[in-house]
Amino acid sequence: MLSTIQPSERQSMLPMPVAAAGFAAGAARPSVLEPLAGVGVTVRAERDEEIVAQGDAAGYCYLIVSGCVRTVRLMEDGRRQVGEFLFPGDLFGWDALEEHDFGAEAVTPATVRRYPRRSLDALADRDPDFAQQLRRLTAGQLRAGRERLVLLGRKTASERIASFLLEMGRQMRAEGKGFIELPMSRSDIADYLGLTIETVCRGLTQFRRHGIIAVERSKVVVRDRRALGAAGCEVLH
Amino acid sequence: MLSTIQPSERQSMLPMPVAAAGFAAGAARPSVLEPLAGVGVTVRAERDEEIVAQGDAAGYCYLIVSGCVRTVRLMEDGRRQVGEFLFPGDLFGWDALEEHDFGAEAVTPATVRRYPRRSLDALADRDPDFAQQLRRLTAGQLRAGRERLVLLGRKTASERIASFLLEMGRQMRAEGKGFIELPMSRSDIADYLGLTIETVCRGLTQFRRHGIIAVERSKVVVRDRRALGAAGCEVLH
DNA sequence: CGTACTCTTGACTCTAATCAAAGTTGGTGG
DNA sequence: CCACCAACTTTGATTAGAGTCAAGAGTACG
């Protein structure tokens, strides 16, 4: 079960360890929702635990406080698409209509803060600064989504895998690490990239054999950044 | 060349013929940007003409007034991804960072209204209603984008084509037509769905042979709505 | 009426999926 | 502590779905 921690305990949760969120610049800082601290409820989720079910009534949205969360969409025959991996500072579900179109599950043990969507809207209505930050956040999500459209629509398997490593590299660099720690399983990666587990493995192996990366289970070290960039169709400027 | 019509002529452009925009509910009505009428410039674009180039400085955003516009991303080797098809009422480029990550081109002769992005932001800052409408519009774009992630990541060729027809059907129904008029070429459709022209043709042919649709060049009549829904993995509720 | 498109169909190829099996790793309990 | 088990990852062999290459059929337009 999801354990809910009452607002009174929140002070221990608020100073978040991590800053930049998402893949694109301009993402939200934890401070964005500070004005809403009073109405938020901190929720703890264990590994693989469901935080929001696909189809849930869209009463709340969620701010990732710690850990990694995946958003998922299941098709009726079991095919799965991972929408995004969320990291501290990322926001989920503010834009749902009446139901959440994707579910959210903890990739690692995670802490999230839950806010009534209505209170977000109300805050945005009375606080233009907040509204602007929300727009900025949203703009980043839209851009990231378009980038993934290109990835899923037009990139080959190994290009997708390289792009994914570059993206996670940005994420990890934001966390100040020198290597990439992949908290998610191969299966999550496959469903994120529109591939199968086997293809993801083979891609990683190929890059390893070419000396571009070193892989050890969930840790990846980028040995040849330039080659990885090229393999992921990174545009230089 | 793009022909620019000065604001003085705008009164003839403003009463827009079409209401609902995009694929998801909650999209913007033309009236959304009415408060900005004074700073908008009406621009006319011929078929296949570029309205915004990928990489252009992101000074302006665009409201589609009439016609159909595609957003496109070109990879260095020529692979192309169509981001979305825009119809009257749809907004493009408000969320660009410093450059437009996608270009915009007229699918049919089109009229768009160009606004400085800064004035959008300024209006949102001083008019909470406008800010809210912008959020609603954005939320719709995010949801539609996630839907396409599933389409591109997990659906088969014929499922993608069926989904596309259903989407265009919604669009056309919004325009009050009894059939689907596809203003874009097979090539545009292919690049929208992450397929090739040939695969799109074969898919359409297959549906035609099964009696699900009737195709004549750019017109499509849906003969078996239920079967098309099933073929596109439409979720009933 | 011919020319230049776009669209459609066919034959073949190739990338990634599927099916299958052999390592690894981590957790649990004897 | 170590053995066993279950889950995850990796590798290999084969298949299938979509891409590529090529040619023909419609259309639109001058």
Image (cartoon, coloured by chain):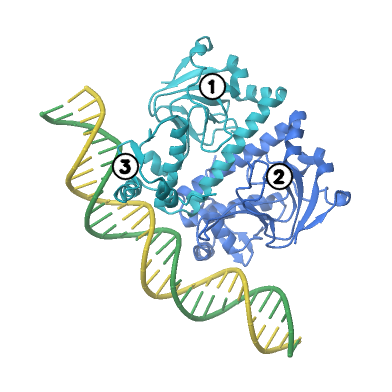
Chain colours: A blue, B cyan, C green, D yellow
Labels 2 and 3 positioned on one and the same chain: no
Which mark is drawn over residue A59?
2
Give how far across and how far down residue B214 sits, in percent.
Answer: 31, 42
Residue neighbourhood size for the residue with mark 2, other residues' Cα within 10 Å, grouped as few (<14), some (14–19), many (≥20): some
Residue neighbourhood size for the residue with mark 3, other residues' Cα within 10 Å, grouped as few (<14), some (14–19), many (≥20): some
Q: What's under tag 2, amino acid-wise?
A: Gly
Mark 2: secondary structure: loop
Give how far across and how far down residue B154 sits, in percent.
Answer: 49, 54
Q: Tell me which residue sits at (56%, 31%) in the image.
A: B93
Q: Which residue is mark 1?
A: B114
Does residue B31 appear left or right of residue A58 in this picture? left
Q: Viewer-nearest of labels 1 and 3?
A: 3
Give how far across and how far down residue C7 sits, in percent.
Answer: 29, 40
Q: Viewer-nearest of labels 2 and 1?
A: 2
Mark 3: secondary structure: strand
Mark 1: secondary structure: strand
Q: Is residue B76 visible?
A: no
Above or below B9: residue B20: below
Give how far across and how far down residue B181 sits, in percent.
Answer: 37, 34
- What is the C-alpha distance between the residues marked 2 and 1? 36 Å
Q: Tell me which residue sits at (69%, 51%) in the image.
A: A87
Which mark is drawn over residue B214?
3
